[in-house]
Image (cartoon, helix red, strand yellow):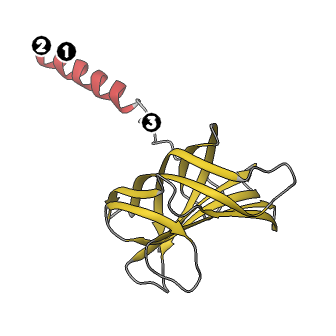
Amino acid sequence: MQKTLFTLWLFTTLLSFSNCKKDKPITPEFPEGRWGYATAKRNGEDWKATCKSFFDKENPDHWRIGLAVHLDNYYFLGGLEFTNVPAAIGNHTVTKSVLWEYEGVRAHYGLSDADVSLGDYHVLNGAEPNFFTVDSYDSVSREIKGRFELTMLVSRRPDPSAPDTVRFMQGTYHTRLDL
């Protein structure tokens, strides 16, 4: 009798556990071709972007990390791009992008109306702090996490009321490299 009751209890317990659903991990929705988020204070206001990062085919052992703002996960409003990022953990000074130079991390910030460029900003060389840090890199998942701060000067004013200087402070990012 005890064996029958124990078997019945065990069967009931196992049946109740088998009906429990395991929650699937929540994967955030990113615009097509993008993975990850970046946040910062841009001129003191909250700024949020999605990421697209990949190995730089023209500059081996380096990454390109793009942080873009989209409206409704589609309509492109602007982006901050870091190029020539060494593929390793470390802190790097960021300087103005110059097409023919490949030394140091470079940054460019552009504003758009979908696919029409409205204006852009370049790094103000010598401003403190101008840095891009890779805090962690997982070579299996290809995920990168880090921080950044920049002071940028207008190159081409997006509109008459646009500021001369844009400061990104307390910037953080979490992205995954595309293959």
Q: x, y (%) of residue 9?
A: 24, 18
Horizontal relation, residue 12 to residue 176: left or right: left
The image shows residue 50 at horizontal and vertical percentages of 60, 53
Whether tag 3 and tag 2 are in contact, CB under 8 A, the answer is no
Query: Does residue 73 lie above or below 20 as drawn?
Result: below
Give the quarter of the image for residue 108: bottom right
Image point (48%, 64%), residue name:
94
Which residue is more in the foreground, 7 or 106?
Answer: 106
As drawn, the label of residue 5 is 1
Q: Depth check: 129 or 59 in front?
A: 129
- The kind of residue tagged 2 is Gln
Q: Which residue is mark 2?
A: 2
- Type of the residue with mark 3: Asp
Numbered label attached to residue 75: none
Instruction: Write down the residue under mark 3.
Output: 23
Of the pair 65 and 105, the residue shown nearer to us? 105
Q: Amino acid at mark 1?
A: Leu
The answer to whether one can see residue 29 in this image is no
Q: Position of residue 151 (x, y in %)?
A: 57, 54
Identify the element where label 1 is drawn. helix
Question: Count the marks: how many?
Answer: 3
- Label 1 and label 3: CA atoms lie apart by 32 Å
- Element at label 2: helix
Report the side of 133 relative to 114 (left or right).
left
- Label 3 to label 2: alpha-carbon separation: 36 Å
Tell which of 21 and 82 is nearer to you: 82
Neighbourhood count class around disc 3 (C-alpha, 10 Å): few under 14, some 14–19, many 20 upward: few
Q: Are marks 2 and 1 in contact (CB under 8 Å)?
A: yes
